[in-house]
Image: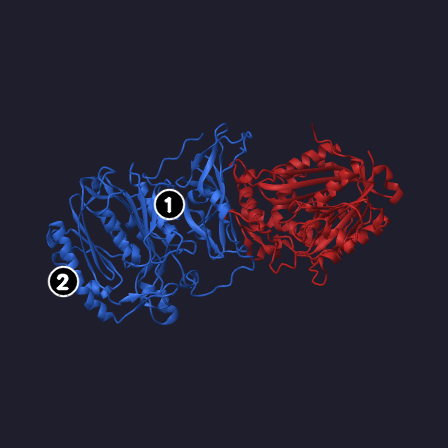
Amino acid sequence: MRGIIASGAYIPHRRLDRSEIAALFGKGGGRGTRSVASFDEDTTTMGAEAARNALRDAGDATVDALWFATSTPAYLEKTNAAAIHAALRLEPSVGALDMGGALRSGIGTIRTALQGGATTLVVSSDIRDGMATSADESAGGDGAAALIIGDDTAGTLIAEYVGSGVATDEFLERWRVPGAERSRVWEERFGEVTYAPLMKDAFAAALADAGIDADQVDHLAVAGLHARAIKRGGKTFGAAAEKMVDDLSGTVGNTGTAHAGLLLAATLEQAEPGQTIAVVMLADGVEVIILRTTDAIADYTSSAPVAAQAAAGAPVSYGKFLSWRGMVAVEPPNRPAPQRTSASAAYRKSDWKFGFVGTRDRSSGMIHMPPARVSQKGGAVDDMEQVPMADTVGMIASFTVDKLVYSPSPPVVFAVVDFQGGGRAPLELTDVDPDEVEIGGRVEPTFRRLSTSDEIHNYFWKVRPVRGEPNEQSPPAREES
Amino acid sequence: MGSHGIKDQVAIIGMGCTPFLEHWDKSLDDLIIDAAHSTYASAGIAQEDIDAFWFGTSQSAASGLALAGPLKIQGKPVTRVENYCATGSEAMRNAAYAVASGAYDVVMALGAEKVKDGGYQGLNAFPIPTDGTQRTLTAAAMFSLILPSYSQKYGVDRDELRYTVAKIAEKNHFNGARNPLAQFRRETSAEQICEMAAVAGELSVFDCAGVADGAAAVIMCRAEDAHKYCPNPLYIKALSFVAGTGAGSLDPDYDYTALLESKWAADDAYAQAGVTDPKIEIAMAEVHDCFTPTELVLMEDLGFSDPGAAWQDVLDGAFQLDGRLPVNTDGGLKSFGHPVGASGLRMLYEVWLQLRGEAPEDRRISETDRNLGLTHNLGGYPGEMVSFVGIYGPELG
């Protein structure tokens, strides 16, 4: 038996109220909110966060491969999955592949993993842009999803793969050339009409493959960028159409490549044992995946549920959104921009930079962040063990707000963080408003892109406030050593 | 093993200091030449009489060539010194040791910095290739960490503490207004400063040192030779230096209410000089007031106030010109700006003037039976800094 061992999602903290768009331009926008990746996030960092959430809920399962799908990669040629691999501290023997470019690669990697053999961490992530006032701008959303897919021998399955259907066709409906700031679309009616038979064929094929009828589908999740085609598909899905799940358009928006995974993760969180889930994605054809939840799903609790993430968040002004997206150039502080990161220096410190791994002196027990060879306490030399810190909660020892220093989005909110169980590091706070910071506040590490200089992205960790009660699923604090 | 110091072995026989300004019309070479030649004149000697040179600059130039070239020093050793914002003091310290060792008869230490050619506000670190994980905060923000921590530790109301550090700026601007070499010569009240917009933590621009170009220099010889050159030399009583391990950034025990490297340097300096109670033995001090909270906690680290009492002492006016222990009588970094390599020697220049009765009357310290002056110069940030303390007096013994 093969299926899903765990799911995870990541929805960035910020929300744009769509009504702000028309308030500024007199047109565009709409109702509800969309999620907005912070200035220090990209598809790689969001993918890493979603993957961390999935791995946290995966029990003892270990993955053999990492696949990463996005239409907005941080790098071309360079494998973005390798940075996620490093942030997750996966073994070198775990393969890491980018499945980039097309929106369809999101659901395609999920289906391929379900039909494959290895325990595969499938991550999809997207940042959805559009020209100011465009439908893409307001309907889009940023986010990532991660699924751990494997055999029941690799881990406890929460959903079993029961079938799929595919219909591929070549037609010009939505496209974007590399480097372009926006996507283009053909006349909407053309796509609507062209998708209709493809949906019908793929859905019928999937039902046949699974050996079920439409009325046996308990949850229908439909993703795709063509809203009218999806709406028209209601007829195609027959009895299943009434089981359509919330597409998150009112809160998160359409996360493109990530959306099929995101809707599946959301559905798994709500599903009862023995239910059938159909996931559909419209993109240059149609892909359909059918899963059936197992009894184990009754005991499965996501540590960061999609519903909770979608309901959380804080507003970002439209002006800030436009500046984060590079649509409006805002004057930076009159300070030098960061220099580019040294490749060789970064490689030597890869465990720290990507994995947030410190070292603990075996004799004194003191944790050193960054890793050190000589102990601050007692001076022992080369007697350190690695200490992963990425899942450790910290407390703000002191903090400040720096309006002078260069930042892609001033001001910099900065804290000296003392971690539970030992270890201190001065770190930037993110997803925070300066007036909510206080000494003693609880924070958790999050993987971010600090800056980009000379076309080199500088990835490292920041901390963000722990919002809400400490989660039972999060790892216990390490003992004081 | 031990830190023995060189008390009364080395004398200061001449000093010079340029105005600290935005010297748009002067190059680093100009500043060096001005400082050097005013110092030769002060000591009454020629450049040829100096046996060895130490040149302190943080980022304006590299190597001894930067001093030998503009001054046309022929066939002499010139050592370039860099030690963050304590660079000027460090150049002087090493030059003094060369005299004490007997290696040279007469030496000069010159510190200079040309900051204003960079095109950015403030001081900016020299780029060294890194892994990209280093903190990139401004120094202002790093030192602003002191205030919330101090407030919490000693139960001082945040607004009252903010006003207290503004009083430090008020005092230093009062003194600087009476100094023709200072960059800022206008008095400013604590109330005005408190009304300004915060730029780093609670700090406004007026809680920060200015940014200026400048140079200063000192000529030293063996104590026994001092009167050959100068009727009223100063004698070095102590020179102390501590480089921290950066512990404050990794050790949760550090609480951002003290600058430990400065405390350790002060303790060592007092031991070298035989000072047992700085509160009543030090006549005046020039300290590194890069930001107002720095001077606040330094009063405790240098032993001028009891722990947790500096804020009250500041409000009581203890460190004003007419206070019990005048601090930064020349206006400090606050009024002078901070040309990194020059600042430590600028501090010493004020001690040179005050202890020898040459400070202008409107900022001269009161006559007391105390005759020791202290300079404190630091570089880095709370929890990870280098720190210098020097003590000087006009009499041997």
Chain identifier of the residue bearing label 1 in the image? A
Q: Which residue is mark 1?
A: A85
- Could you tell whether B161 is left or right of A39 in the image? right
Which part of the image, by quadrant, shows the N terminus of chain B? top right
The blue-coloured chain is labelled A
Q: Nearer the viewer, residue B163 or B274?
A: B274
* Picture coordinates of residue A409, whole percent (x, y): 47, 57
Give the residue type that dot 2 points to: Lys
Q: Chain B is which colour? A: red
Q: Can I make out residue A85 in this image? A: yes
Q: Nearer the viewer, residue A470 or A323?
A: A323
Asked which quadrant contains residue A94, the reply is: top left
Q: Which residue is mark 2?
A: A235
Q: Nearer the viewer, residue B350 or A141?
A: A141
Q: Residues within 10 Å of mark 2 (few under 14, many from 20)?
A: few
Please determine whether, in this image, residue A386 is positioned above or below residue B61.
Answer: above
- Could you tell whether A37 is left or right of B63 in the image? left
Q: Residues within 10 Å of mark 1 (few under 14, many from 20)?
A: many
* Kind of element beneath mark 1: helix
